[in-house]
Image (cartoon, coloured by chain):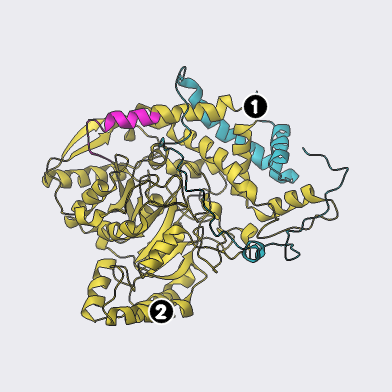
Amino acid sequence: MPRITREQVLYTARLARLRLTDDEARAMTRHLEAILDYAAQLETVDTEGVEPMSHVMALETPLRSDAPQAGLSADDALANAPGSDGTHFLVPKILDSETQA
Amino acid sequence: MAAPIASLIELCADLESGRSSAVALVENVFARADEVDGALQTLLHPRRAAALEEAAVSDARRAAGRLRSPLDGIPIAIKDNIVQAGEPASCASRILEGYRSPFSATAVERLRGAGAVIVARTNMDEFAMGSSTENSVRGPSRNPWSLERTPGGSSGGSAAAVSAGIVPLALGSDTGGSIRQPASFCGVVGMKPTYGRVSRRGLVAFASSLDQIGPIARSARDCALLLDVLSGADPGDSTALPEAALESHRALDGDVSGLRIGLPKEIRETPGVSPEVLTKVEEAVAELERAGARSLEVSLPHTRFALATYYLISTAEASGNLARFDGVRYGFRASSDGGGVTPMYERTRSAGFGDEVKRRILLGTFALSAGYYDAYYRKAQQLRTLLLRDFEAAFQHCDVLALPTTPQPAFRIGEKTGEPLSMYLTDVFTVPANLTGAPGVSLPCGFQDGLPLGLQLMGRPLEDATVLRVADAFQRRSEYHLQRPPL
């Protein structure tokens, strides 16, 4: 059984907000299958009871004093926007009929 | 003919004696770039006029006796994923086309505070995803030692620019080897510091638990001087170490007597490792033994799983970090074609990202998705724990580890682009340092068929200065780092 099918690749692409052409879907399926086959070697390791590590250093989350500080100005924040009215980011209209994947 | 620019230490002496000026150094940089960078393609967005102005201000500081640091007036190039206020930061991606950063990275602020002169940004693999600098929207950079070969990656532009004598110093970023591997391929010194040693604020995130900014230079001593300026606590990065700036350059006394060098026995068993690479690493260790160090064999049984672990963890983190590129706040936006906001996101991301970035987003999204999370992502995190235990055990018996940086010297452009997994395998010796947070430096230790080979030294987390001291001790006894490519 393949580790990942073309349908799973297309589903994952929808989750990641990517559209794949037929050629891309074919190539990505082949590449991801090769990578997941390689990663299957991890299955040979007994990890029963091993704590998963998300971060290498157990740092406390440092807190700064709760005092106002200057942040990015609205002009600076909007300077790179592909669409802006000077005070907001503009995006295409969100249609009622649109459903989230 | 423009001479290659000298090393940092030599330039400091030239500036101090008045034999050169900061303005003359910037002129040297661009004359050299004009001569060789057409072929190499290392620099993006040169700041010729701004750099000349900043250099003149540095010269005035020097004349007034108000130097800020040893780096005052020294030219430096920075990788295109480290932001500078008012400058482009494209990460070599179409999706950041036209972007100009509203703020500077902490590393950039520290460089400018030290008086260094930023001359250009450097080419890279898109979003630092790659091992050859071929995944750049601007086209590949080339290796100064052999133009048909890659400089490595993802910080290939930075390493090749230092190797070619365009700049004495450059910044790179290293998530799985992206400083050390190109340093090895280009015959220069590159260091991934301990995780947290250099603030990541202003480094465009790839995999946040692995990313580090680090120095690329001609010698361990030059790297130490640059790292000392970059290091230190930062309220803008909660993962930056809460420690004062390093003074690692003061630790470089050439003394390695009594130092224990561990040689991981698993290295020899790695498929595809060049016998010449192994020989050169052994010769380098023998040289350090003649200087008073001793070597012993150590075992790191889980390192054979490190690469698979790395590619699952790094892509999982990347899939989240790259969600922000959606065509709303910055960069490129594709037309929604009247379809609303979700089609706009999809069209923007599909047209804005290159193939390798899409592949890693897909792999990471899959590894995190319902039904696969435990089998892939959680399993990889457990392997990361086992790997860290291996290294902690080894460092009970030795002070540094010596191993190759890469299994082979630089490969040809195009050689690995069709098969992503074969490209990933070039990172097999570099990913453990990122997964365990340890400092690692790559330095030249020989040649194979005219191509540089790299010795990698790893140390205990926080012991950046030890790693640099051993690298410097080797360079006091060898001349590989003094070789220049035939340009």
Percent position (x, y) of residue B45?
A: 52, 70
Secondary structure under badge 2? helix
The subunit carrying tag 2 is B
Chain bearing tag 1 is A
* Amino acid type assigned to the residue bearing label 1 in the image: Pro
Q: Residue B404: x and y, percent?
A: 32, 44
**Which residue lies at the image location 55% right of the left edge and 53% below the top edge?**
B127
Chain whose colour in the figure is cyan = A
Q: SS at mark 1?
A: loop
Q: Are marks 2 and 1 in contact (CB under 8 Å)?
A: no
**What is the span of residues highlighted in magenta in the rendered image?**
B387-401
Task: Check disc 2 and give the amino acid type.
Answer: Ala
Picture coordinates of residue B357, whole percent (x, y): 60, 48
- Residue B397 shown in magenta: yes
Q: Colour of chain B?
A: yellow
Q: Is residue B290 magenta?
A: no
Q: Work out which quarter of the rendered image holds the N terminus of chain B and state it.
A: bottom left
Q: Position of residue B25 (x, y in %)?
A: 34, 77
Mark 2 → mark 1, Cα distance in angstroms: 55 Å
How crowded is the residue under tag 1: few (<14 C-alpha within 10 Å), some, or many (20+)? few
For disc 1, the marked residue is A2
Relative depth, front residue between B371 and B150: B371
Residue that numbered label 2 is attached to: B31
Residue at the outermost front position: A67
